[in-house]
Image: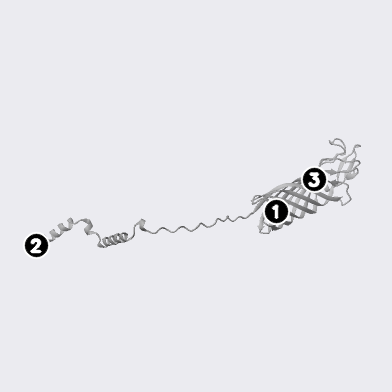
Amino acid sequence: MRLGGACLCAVIAILGAGLPARALADPLAASAKDATNEQAAAEPAEEDKPPRPPLPPAPPREPLPWHERLEVGGGMAVAAVLSAKDGDRNPSAVRLKPGVGFNIRLSWQVLPYLWFTGYLVESRHPLDLPAGSLGLPGAMTGDAAWMYTFGARVSPTLPIGTRVRLWLTAGAGWGRVGYPRLCPKQPCAGALLVRERAASMVEIPLGFGAAFEVIPRWLRVHAELTGSVLPSQKGEALEHTQTIDAAGKKRDVGPMPWFDGTITQTIGLSLVL
């Protein structure tokens, strides 16, 4: 009996080793493959399928949102100085004639209707020095006085359409005026030579302006009219000094004018950033 059982086990082992690997595969995998084949056979061929519906039309193109933030520009400036008294608050015959110069501006849009502007204005003013001015005999001559101011302004702005802007402006700034060497004749030589002097000032500008957009989103032409009061002025130009006359004696030289105010007209181009 034992010998017969051993022989039966050996026969079963030999038969199992000879079976192909596919026969030993998982019956679940075989059934899944059969189901896939049946589904593929049930689907119609590619040429028998109905045509694909057309794609919907493309949405219209819309420009990307654009917001200006900065404006930088410059141009010509014409400035007039108002004065009637000297540094001692006495009547003065010295006058600064209207002068031409340049301006530079950088504006930043803080709010939709409010701009903040930094500015620089430079101008040169020929001097009118009649006989007896500054307490000296005879008329004096010299080069033009040089004046510059810089500061910041806020400007409530009103857009008109898409290309025009109007605004009011107010702010504060600081400046300086330099006077040339003065003498009875040019070039200066000999007696009655008045050395160069200068004075500094604080200004409060008030004005209005307008801008027109020449090239949309790129270039504007702007014009602005500003009047400034000068509450604080100081410097050696507003004080007395001395010189030597032809006889070798000291002479007192009076102070230069005290400014009551300035009026500045600017016009130029601005690049929109």
Q: Position of residue 272 (x, y in %)?
A: 65, 51
164 in relation to 127, above or below: below
Q: Position of residue 23 (x, y in %)?
A: 21, 58
Residue 146 seen in the current view: no
Residue 129 lies left or right of residue 173; in this view the side is right
Of discs 3 and 2, which sits in the foreground?
3
In this rendered view, identify the residue nearer to me: 38 or 196. Answer: 38
Q: Position of residue 21 (x, y in %)?
A: 22, 56
Residue annotated with mark 1: 117
Residue 21 seen in the current view: yes
Q: Amino acid at mark 2?
A: Gly
Q: Amino acid at mark 3?
A: Gly
126 in relation to 205, above or below: above
**Neighbour class for label 2 at 10 Å: few (<14), some, many (≥20)?**
few
Q: Secondary structure at mark 2?
A: helix
Q: Secondary structure at mark 1?
A: strand
In this rendered view, identify the residue nearer to me: 270 or 233. Answer: 270
Circle number at residue 18: none
Query: Tag 2 or tag 1, which sits nearer the N-term?
Result: 2
Residue annotated with mark 3: 99
Query: Tag 2 or tag 3, which sits nearer the N-term?
Result: 2
Q: Secondary structure at mark 3?
A: strand
Circle number at residue 4: 2
Q: Position of residue 5 (x, y in %)?
A: 11, 63
In this rendered view, identify the residue nearer to me: 205 or 214. Answer: 214
Whole-angstrom CA distance, mark 3 to mark 2, is: 133 Å
Residue 12 lies left or right of residue 247; in this view the side is left
Q: Amino acid at mark 1?
A: Thr
The answer to whether the residues at label 1 and label 3 have Cβ atoms under 8 Å apart is no
Q: Classify residue 163 by image quadrant.
A: bottom right
Q: Classify residue 244 by image quadrant.
A: top right
